[in-house]
Image: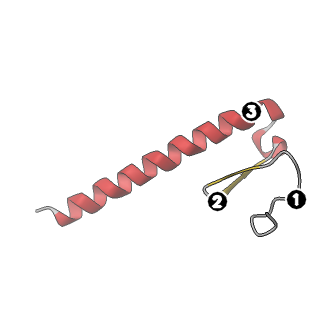
């Protein structure tokens, strides 16, 4: 947890890249909204990367 920068509770880490706390989310009640947004963003980015890779290979 120290390696990820977690030093308070509650803290949620998404994809070892985004650290969400009540302060970064704006409020404790928004934490899961931020997590949901980031998960969807990561999924979308990965799908786009896969599509781009396939299009670069295909003629």
Ranked by sequence position, the earlier of labels 1 and 2 is: 1
- Marks 1/2 in contact by CB < 8 Å: the verdict is no
- Residue 20, image x and y in percent? 74, 48
Q: Residues within 10 Å of mark 3 (few under 14, many from 20)?
A: some
Where 30 falls versus 47 (above or below)? Answer: above
Residue 15 left/right relative to 26: left
Q: How is the image coloured?
A: secondary structure
In the picture, measured across the screen, residue 8 lies left or right of residue 1, that is right
Q: Position of residue 59 (x, y in %)?
A: 10, 62
Residue situated in front as seen by the camera: 45 or 9: 9
Q: Is residue 52 left or right of residue 30?
A: left
Neighbourhood count class around disc 2 (C-alpha, 10 Å): few under 14, some 14–19, many 20 upward: few
Considering only order in the chain, which callout, 3 or 2, is on the residue closer to the N terminus?
2
Callout 2: SS: loop
The answer to which of marks 3 and 1 sits earlier in the sequence is 1
**In the image, is residue 59 above or below residue 11?**
below
Q: Quadrant of residue 56?
A: bottom left
Q: Residue at x 80, y 46 (%)?
A: 21
In which quadrant is the N terminus drawn? bottom right
Quadrant housing residue 4: bottom right
Q: CA distance from mark 3 to mark 1?
A: 19 Å
Give the residue drawn at x 44%, y 51%.
Answer: 45
Which numbered marker is on residue 7? 1
Residue at screen point 76% across, 40% down = 25
Q: Residue furthest left?
A: 59
| Residue on which the image places disc 2 | 17
Q: Residue furthest front?
A: 1
As helix, strand or loop, the secondary structure at mark 3 comes to helix
Quickly name the residue at label 3.
30
Alpha carbon distance from label 2 to label 3: 18 Å
Residue 40: image location, x then y, percent: 52, 41
Q: Circle 1: is it few (<14), some (14-19), or many (20+) Cα within 10 Å?
A: few
């Amino acid at each position: 947890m120290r390696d990820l920068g977690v030093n308070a509770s509650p803290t949620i880490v998404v994809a070892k890249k985004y650290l969400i706390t009540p302060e970064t989310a704006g409020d404790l009640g928004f934490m899961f909204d931020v997590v949901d947004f980031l998960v969807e963003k990561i999924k979308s980015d990965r799908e786009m990367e896969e599509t781009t890779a396939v299009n670069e290979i295909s003629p």
